[in-house]
Image: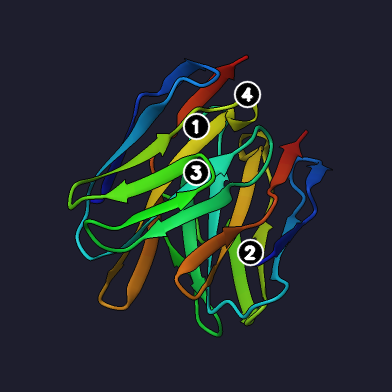
Amino acid sequence: EDQVTQSPEALRLQEGESSSLNCSYTVSGLRGLFWYRQDPGKGPEFLFTLYSAGEEKEKERLKATLTKKESFLHITAPKPEDSATYLCAVWVTSGGYQKVTFGTGTKLQVIP
Amino acid sequence: GAVVSQHPSRVICKSGTSVKIECRSLDFQATTMFWYRQFPKQSLMLMATSNEGSKATYEQGVEKDKFLINHASLTLSTLTVTSAHPEDSSFYICSARGGQQAFFGQGTRLTVV
């Protein structure tokens, strides 16, 4: 069974204090790994897709990396507006069937 | 990025009635759409995967007759919650796959009274 685990569950940072969020996965047939940001009461907002181990992608203060077992979302010098829940999801295909499974998310709070 | 529009954003219905939620990909064709359910402070739980023109694939534990999914075109999928009950109250979100990415609708908050 596909498993996706995110840690920590919650993270509180001072503005400007860099940190990393972790997404560990155990799946077969990985097609890609997504990172999303979700604000309360809203649908997830797409951030990145990573396809293969060693791949990195950056967007503003965010950088996502991928290994064969986990992905990291690095947040450099975060600002209060970065406060949100960050979700990772694995996209798998098996015998023509595809599925996206989400982790439980990391709730990030950035304090001014 | 690509736009996925979900409607309605909020709906309140009486127990025993049915509710239809629409999910449209506005600027791309989505051969595959996913429907999720999210309980407060929990992650998204995949309910079903639908491919255009074929029957949806439901996840274990999801009642097919209760959550009817139709994916009649490359830009529209619908989720109908039939004979809704208070325990069906939740946040429902659709996702449409466009190329190598998956984009989400705004979500629908369903309250069954």
User: Given the image, on which type of amino acid does mark 1 rest?
Assistant: Gln
| B76 over B105 or under it: above or below | below
The foreground one among B18 and B52 is B52
Q: Residue at x 47, y 42 (%)?
A: A62
Compute the Cα span from label 1 to label 4.
22 Å
- C-alpha span from label 2 to label 1: 26 Å
Residue B90 in the image, given as x and y percentages of width and height: 64, 38
Mark seen at residue A80:
4
Whether residues under marks 2 and 1 lie with C-beta atoms below 8 angstroms apart, the answer is: no
Q: Is residue B59 visible?
A: no
Per the image, the residue denoted by label 1 is: B42
Q: Amino acid at mark 3?
A: Leu
Side of A3 where B29 appears, left or right? right
Q: Amino acid at mark 2?
A: Gly
Marks 3 and 4 share the same chain: no
Instruction: Tell me the CA gap for discs 4 and 2.
Output: 24 Å
Q: Which residue is mark 3?
A: B44
Q: Chain of mark 1?
A: B
CA gap between label 3 and label 2 equals 21 Å
Badges 3 and 1, same chain: yes
Q: Which residue is mark 2?
A: B1
